[in-house]
């Protein structure tokens, strides 16, 4: 509970002198009939303890919690970067065996945008082209020559640079030299190049300028609402997660402790959602 | 040609002109043939190192693997009576097997490549000594001279073999999924893994593919000397790093240049050649090579710190 019983938004306003910026794009288009991902009793010691939930086509599912609550750990288990001890993951209704990130990408069309783009998300000393194309090489390679089709790679990279408004001097520029926001777009872009159905984005706007942040929000919304992608949004940015996610799972001590559903449908206010999240975190 | 390669090419060109001007015998047919042979030899050994460096590792046992390949060649020809080409293939295979052992230790047991290959350096060297028991195979047929003594267009056959190997290397790293994934693995292993690259497999493959090149150099050595020298490989470690690093293969991984390796080898070979001509004390050679490595690393570090950012 907030001190003095003040509504959270008012408290923030008193502290920082302005209302927290909220994000709003209207009504989501979730297809409840298409369960894209189902997690049942996923357990890995010190990471997640018996986590179960479903994710639907067109949905942005928010995971909120403190650092270490199990959200990033869950993401890494889902994409095969680490292995769970027990529990099951179903993708499009069938049980998935995800032994590596390669499995999650090539077999299950799933991508993970890491929270540490410099350490885990980018080849900093490689070109924008390489960083965007890395997930499609296998698809655009000649059968016998094993030669990557440079033109296909260029086209894919150029299309993403245009679509994501990545500010770069060209495809050959090292991502090292890009701003944080543009690096983040590249880190995310490689999964769009691969055409992933399921995207897990971890703190997608940390260290990103305001304009790029708004662009990334719009992009995530459109991917879900217009293209029917299923998105898991891990974020500690309250306005971001409340504005984008139609449903929020609250994580605490490696478990899901609360679910807030139909946020947009019921027209739940920012204050109401943040109050309920706060109730379960303390 | 990349910017880095241009600088190396300039140095190599200057050294070549310098050597040609200061010695009348430098441009003689025999000396050029001989230099082509030594350059090819250095490139193969350095490439064996570079293929591992590029994936973010290192291989201290390249020389020991060369030693293994050397006695394997001798044993196959003299004791088993195999034809030379088959003996050479077996030697390459033994090299690959030794590299596979390195790769498995590194990827499965998660031991860093420095420690793993330091240990196998001694294991392999011990095997060479134990197996040959100090006895050199001397009964190598005269026909086994294709790589080491014969030439084509005035340059050693080994040189042309090396050219083919470098062209294949260039193609692999520039154009193929395998090469690009190896570069990505060396550039940032965790990012590569999280982008769907099986990085353990790439590292294992780099360790399996590189030693056959060292083995090829060893076979060429047998072919040149007419007998397998048990000491083959004991002095390869330093030059393998020197040529690779001068040639633009970073110690940190993620970078390699086939042309750079060739030019790096030319530079190192000509510097050694030059030291002989200047009548410098040959016993100091290792000190020179070590200093060159240090210089190359410092230059690349300075370039990273100051030069590289200007493009931003």
Image (tube, coloured by chain):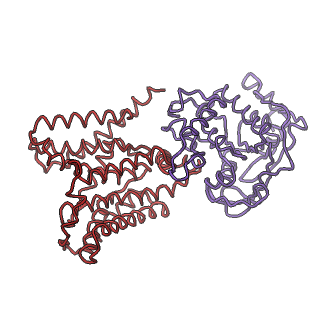
Chain colours: A purple, B red
B56 or A138, which is in the foreground? Answer: A138
The quadrant in which residue A119 appears is: top right
Instruction: Please indicate whether residue A135 sits to the left or right of residue A231 in the image.
Output: left
Q: Is residue B126 visible?
A: no
Question: Which residue appears at 45% of the width and 46% of the height?
Answer: B173
Residue most extreme to the top: A17
Instruction: Please indicate whether residue B227 sits to the left or right of residue A31 in the image.
Output: left
B191 or A109, which is in the foreground? Answer: A109
Query: From what the image shows, is residue B302 above or below residue B171?
Result: above
Q: Is residue A152 visible?
A: yes
The quadrant in which residue B249 appears is: top left
Question: Which residue appears at 29% of the width and 59% of the height?
Answer: B63
Residue most extreme to the right: A266
Image location (x, y in percent) of residue B150 = 21, 56
Instruction: Please indicate whether residue A201 sits to the left or right of residue A130 in the image.
Output: right
Residue most extreme to the front: B153
Image location (x, y in percent) of residue B115 = 38, 59
Query: From what the image shows, is residue A278 above or below residue B52?
Result: above
Give the mark count: 0
B65 or A63, which is in the foreground? Answer: B65
In the picture, the quarter occupied by the N terminus of chain B is top left
The quadrant in which residue A269 appears is: top right
Image location (x, y in percent) of residue B113 = 41, 57
Image location (x, y in percent) of residue B6 = 33, 33
Query: From what the image shows, is residue A112 above or below residue B214?
Result: above
Instruction: Please indicate whether residue B127 sits to the left or right of residue B101 in the image.
Output: left
């Amino acid at each position: 509970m907030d001190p003095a019983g003040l509504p959270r938004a008012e408290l923030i306003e008193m502290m920082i002198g302005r209302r927290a910026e909220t994000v709003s794009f209207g009504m989501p288009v979730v297809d409840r009939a298409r369960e894209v991902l189902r997690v049942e009793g996923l357990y890995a010691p010190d990471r997640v303890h018996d986590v179960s939930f479903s994710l639907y086509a067109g949905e942005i599912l928010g995971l909120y919690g403190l650092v270490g609550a199990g959200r990033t750990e869950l993401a890494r288990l889902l994409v095969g970067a680490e292995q769970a001890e027990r529990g099951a993951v179903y993708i499009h209704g069938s049980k998935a065996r995800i032994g590596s990130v390669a499995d999650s990408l090539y077999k299950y069309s799933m991508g993970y945008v890491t929270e540490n783009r410099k350490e885990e998300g980018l080849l900093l000393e490689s070109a924008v082209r390489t960083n965007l194309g890395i997930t499609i090489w296998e698809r655009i390679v000649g059968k016998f020559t094993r030669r990557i089709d440079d033109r296909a790679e260029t086209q894919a990279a150029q299309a993403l640079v245009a679509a994501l408004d990545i500010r770069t001097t060209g495809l050959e520029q090292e991502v090292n030299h890009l701003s944080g926001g543009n690096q983040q777009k590249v880190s995310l872009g490689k999964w769009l190049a691969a055409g992933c159905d399921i995207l897990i984005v971890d703190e997608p706007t940390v260290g990103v300028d305001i304009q790029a942040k708004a662009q990334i929000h719009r992009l995530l919304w459109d991917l879900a609402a217009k293209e029917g992608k299923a998105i898991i949004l891990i974020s500690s940015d309250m306005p971001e997660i409340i504005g984008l996610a139609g449903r929020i799972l609250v994580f605490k001590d490696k478990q899901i402790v609360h679910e807030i559903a139909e946020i947009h449908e019921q027209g739940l206010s920012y204050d109401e959602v943040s109050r309920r999240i706060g109730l379960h975190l303390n | 040609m990349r910017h880095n390669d241009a600088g190396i090419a300039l140095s190599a060109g200057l050294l070549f002109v310098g050597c040609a001007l200061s010695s009348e015998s430098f441009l003689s047919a025999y000396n050029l043939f001989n230099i082509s042979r030594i350059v090819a030899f250095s490139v193969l050994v350095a490439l064996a190192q570079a293929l591992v460096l590029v994936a973010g590792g290192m291989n201290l046992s390249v020389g020991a693997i060369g030693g293994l390949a050397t006695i394997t060649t001798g044993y196959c020809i003299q004791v088993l009576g195999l034809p030379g080409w088959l003996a050479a293939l077996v030697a390459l295979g033994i090299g690959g097997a030794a590299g596979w052992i390195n790769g498995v230790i590194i990827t499965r047991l998660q031991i860093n490549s420095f420690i793993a290959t330091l240990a196998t350096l001694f294991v392999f060297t011990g095997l060479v000594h134990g197996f040959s028991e100090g006895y050199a195979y001397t009964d190598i047929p005269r026909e086994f001279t294709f790589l080491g003594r014969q030439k084509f267009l005035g340059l050693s056959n080994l040189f042309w073999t090396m050219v083919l190997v470098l062209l294949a290397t260039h193609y692999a790293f520039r154009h193929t999924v395998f090469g690009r994934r190896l570069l990505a693995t060396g550039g940032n292993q965790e990012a590569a893994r999280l982008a769907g690259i099986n990085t353990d497999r790439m590292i294992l493959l780099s360790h399996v593919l590189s030693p056959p090149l060292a083995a090829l150099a060893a076979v060429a050595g047998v072919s040149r000397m007419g007998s397998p020298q048990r000491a083959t490989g004991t002095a390869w470690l330093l030059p393998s790093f020197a040529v690779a690093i001068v040639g633009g293969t970073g110690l940190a991984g993620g970078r390699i240049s086939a042309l750079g390796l060739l030019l790096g080898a030319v530079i190192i070979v000509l510097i050694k050649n030059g030291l002989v001509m200047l009548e410098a004390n040959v016993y100091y050679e290792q000190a020179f090579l070590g200093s060159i490595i240090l210089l190359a690393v410092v230059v690349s570090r300075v370039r990273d710190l100051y030069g590289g950012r200007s493009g931003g």
